Amino acid sequence: MNRTFAVVDDFAPEAESLRKHFDERFANPRVADGGRFVWDWWHVPGQYTALRTPAWEYFPKDVYESFHKRLVAWGRRTLGCHDISPPWMSCYIDGCAQQMHGDLPHGPWAFVFSLTKWKGRVFRGGETMMLRDEVLDFWSDFVSERSVEEPDVIRTIEPRFNRLTVFDPRIPHGVREVSGTRDPREGRLVIHGWFVQPRPLVEGPLPGAQLRKRVDDLTESLGPWLNGDLPLAGLLSIGFRVLPTGEVSEVAVLSDTTRVPRSEEKNRKRFVAEVVKRVKAMTFPKQKDASWVTLPMVFERAP
């Protein structure tokens, strides 16, 4: 998983049903229906313009809950985030856009799930835009002879149908202005929000009390790093399996948004490697079966 973003295509089988419900509500523009009156025209001059509505209230309960549970389960296992914020659904038609901004302190990961009919679209724009990491530390490797154009400073991600895009919301991002249609059925349609509440996930018989004790020991052992001069900020999620013998295997960094000044990047990498090393060295009492653990660790830079 990229430290800045991840893209998962064909994420949810519920996408077709969600999209069908939206299209049916807008099928006949001459019919006045309460389902058409739930949209808020969100306009902050110079910053945000879009139609939006609470996603969890818009769709039939069964299909939405199935999608919601799928998204939450993915966030728990992949990111170590227990839940998602109440998600919005936004529709972008001609003139709609989001200018560059950062989402603080909504959650450690943002998500955009697209219901946009991207293939065969009639509009222009609509891509998610993110400043590239190099721009956030532009002068560290600046070369005056090198030309710089938009693709060199801004990453764009297309909102293809049934695509889940997840990214670090601290990074300045936006939505390129949509032009070419005023029909909601032909615009950019997305469900979006934030993954929140980082906390450990255990799949299997491993008792929570045993995990908490090992996590406390891990935190204490990392004290010299955390109390030193490493100005670390972000979320580091480690995944590992606890075997019936109590040994740990399959240790992997699942996601990592930890950031430091460029001069400290080598030390940050050494710290992450040290965390992985110490997790591998953990031992637990014997269990009847294996367990999978997703362990998120939140680091906040002192003011």
Image (spheres, rainbow, N blue to C red):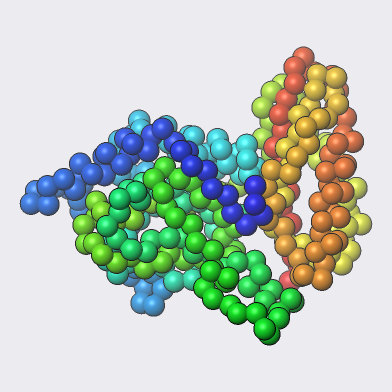
Seen from the viewer's position, the closer of residues 208 and 265 is: 265
Relative vertical location of residue 215 with respect to residue 185 in this rendering, above or below: above
Is residue 87 visible in the rendered image? The answer is no
The spot of residue 97 in percent (x, y) is: 37, 67
Furthest-front residue in this view: 145
| Residue located 35% across and 30% down the image | 62
The image quadrant that residue 261 belongs to is bottom right
Quarter occupied by the C terminus? bottom right
Seen from the viewer's position, the closer of residues 139 and 293 is: 139
The spot of residue 5 in percent (x, y) is: 59, 54
| Residue located 20% across and 53% down the image | 37
Seen from the viewer's position, the closer of residues 233 and 220 is: 233
Relative vertical location of residue 240 with respect to residue 142 in this rendering, above or below: above
Relative vertical location of residue 134 with respect to residue 10 in this rendering, above or below: below
Q: Is residue 188 left or right of residue 138?
A: left
| Residue located 50% across and 61% down the image | 156
Relative vertical location of residue 159 with respect to residue 132 in this rendering, above or below: above
Furthest-top residue in this view: 288
The spot of residue 181 in percent (x, y) is: 23, 62
Is residue 112 visible in the rendered image? The answer is yes
Q: Is residue 27 left or right of residue 15?
A: left
The image quadrant that residue 253 belongs to is top right
The spot of residue 219 in percent (x, y) is: 84, 47
Furthest-bottom residue in this view: 144
| Residue located 58% across and 49% down the image | 6
